[in-house]
Image: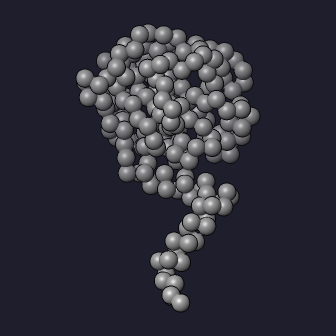
Amino acid sequence: MKKLSLSNIIFVVVIALLIIPQTRKPIQVALQKIRVQLFSPSTLDKEDQQQLEPFTYHLRSLDGISKGIEIGQGRVTFISYWATWCPPCIAEFPSIDKLFKDYGNEIDFLLITNEDPEIVKRFLKEKEFDIPVVLPQMNTPEELYESSIPTSYIIDATGKIIIKEQGAVDWNSTEIREVIDQLIIN
């Protein structure tokens, strides 16, 4: 009979922890937090920056108040499609929250989810985030539709997609702040 090596034992324990629902999500979030620390979104090449036609994004607050946010009509917009059950979303949320605290009055932040508002409110309270989350009241515009979350965008004041990022990244990086600062100045 073969002896079990330490690496085989560790492997079996990790697999077991990933199978158990109570430990799977925290492990996935922790692994995604490592990714967030390593990766910052980057600006799209000029030829890849898609120009959106100006439109109004119809949304509803978690308290049921309808509102329309103008996209490409004079303000920079940060859009993130996310969910409370999504480990990469949870991992990058603190960096978005920090960015919102510094730029929330200067650019529009749309953190869009399709979840039950009570679940989202509980998540925000538990994690101590004070960022406005909204629910869509229209279909996602085709130019912004992706089947995976998180997917996030920074759109300039004219409606050009400057950054598009799928997966967990550090939105509070120096590079992103420099991009936003430039977009606000222009």
Q: Position of residue 76 (x, y in %)?
A: 42, 20
Q: Position of residue 163 (x, y in %)?
A: 36, 29
**Residue 186 sits in quarter:** top left
**Residue 180 sits in quarter:** top left
Residue 102 vertical position relative to residue 23 in the rendered view, above or below: above
| Residue under the point 37% across and 42% down | 40
Pick out the residue farthest to the front.
Answer: 1
Q: Position of residue 149 (x, y in %)?
A: 52, 37
Residue 170 vertical position relative to residue 108 in the rendered view, above or below: below
Asked whether residue 184 is in view, the answer is no
Number of marks drawn: 0
Residue 151 vertical position relative to residue 34 in the rendered view, above or below: above
| Residue under the point 25% across and 23% down | 47
Residue 56 vertical position relative to residue 50 in the rendered view, above or below: above
Pick out the residue farthest to the right.
Answer: 118
Model colouring? one colour
| Residue under the point 46% across and 15% down | 71
Asked whether residue 61 is in view, the answer is yes
Taking the image as shown, residue 8 lies to the left or right of residue 160, namely right
